[in-house]
Amino acid sequence: MSRIVVTAFAALLLSTPAWSAGGTRAPVPEPTLTPQEEALELYNRGLAYRDRAWKIQEKAAKADPEGREKLGAKIEAVYGKAIEAYEAAIERSPELHQAWSSLGYARRKTGDLEGSLEAYDRALELAPEYAEAIEYRGEAYLGLGRLEEAREAYMELFASDRERADELLASMRRWLEDPSSADPQGVEEMRGWVEERSLIAEQTAELRGGGTSSRW
């Protein structure tokens, strides 16, 4: 979810100060933004909220149970503000696929998995190879117990973006530690598949001299 830089979009309307007949400075009209420029500003505002939520998550990871609960409510509220910013950005520029993907991420972080899938699907309609949305949609599939679709997402990333594939595989390992109410047989199949893919990933990582990374 990279930040999109908004370049300077307006110049001074007058090269010298404007004065009224009485000698007071006349107001200079505020520059008007295009819908696309407004969308980018709102998208970046959403990313700022996301970054704030990440910092609170770091604090929550080190807090006691009571503190973690309080911080958890704060995290959800900050993600809620990010959602509002992303949705406002999309209203102004519906084709901004990064905003759709980021909206899916924020919805997923607040527990709205179905809503997150809708946003990821739209992002990938606009940009079918957008690896971020493929990865995070795979994580949403995990949360919903749609394991075959999660595996398909991994295989797509394995062929196109190994770093993102490694991230999704790491999420699968974490999911297997607490698969909640998923079908037991499906969980065991998933466990075997993850073990197999982990071995392949390690072998191919050695061949290409790389490793895995970690992101929220």
Image: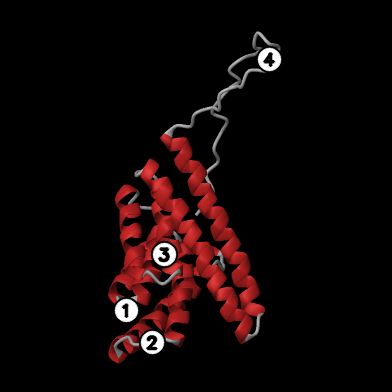
Q: Is residue 39 above or below residue 206?
A: above
Indicate which label's residue lies in the foreground, 4 or 2.
4
- The three-letter amino acid code for the residue at tag 1 is Gly
Graded by Cα atoms within 10 Å as few (under 14), some (14 to 19) or many (20 or more), the crowding at tag 4 reads: few
Graded by Cα atoms within 10 Å as few (under 14), some (14 to 19) or many (20 or more), the crowding at tag 2 reads: few
Q: Is residue 151 left or right of residue 213?
A: left
Residue indicated by mark 1: 145
Is residue 131 visible from the viewing direction of this image?
no
Mark 4 to mark 1: distance in Å?
64 Å
* Residue situated furthest bottom in the rendering: 184
Upstream in the sequence, badge 4 or badge 1? 4
Residue indicated by mark 2: 180
Q: Position of residue 6 (x, y in %)?
A: 54, 37
Mark 4 to mark 3: distance in Å?
48 Å
Upstream in the sequence, badge 1 or badge 2? 1
Indicate which label's residue lies in the foreground, 3 or 2.
3
- The three-letter amino acid code for the residue at tag 4 is Pro
Mark 1 to mark 2: distance in Å?
9 Å
Indicate which label's residue lies in the foreground, 1 or 3.
3
Describe the element under mark 3 as helix, strand or loop.
helix
Residue indicated by mark 4: 17
- The three-letter amino acid code for the residue at tag 3 is Arg
Given residues 112 and 24, the one toward you in this image is 24
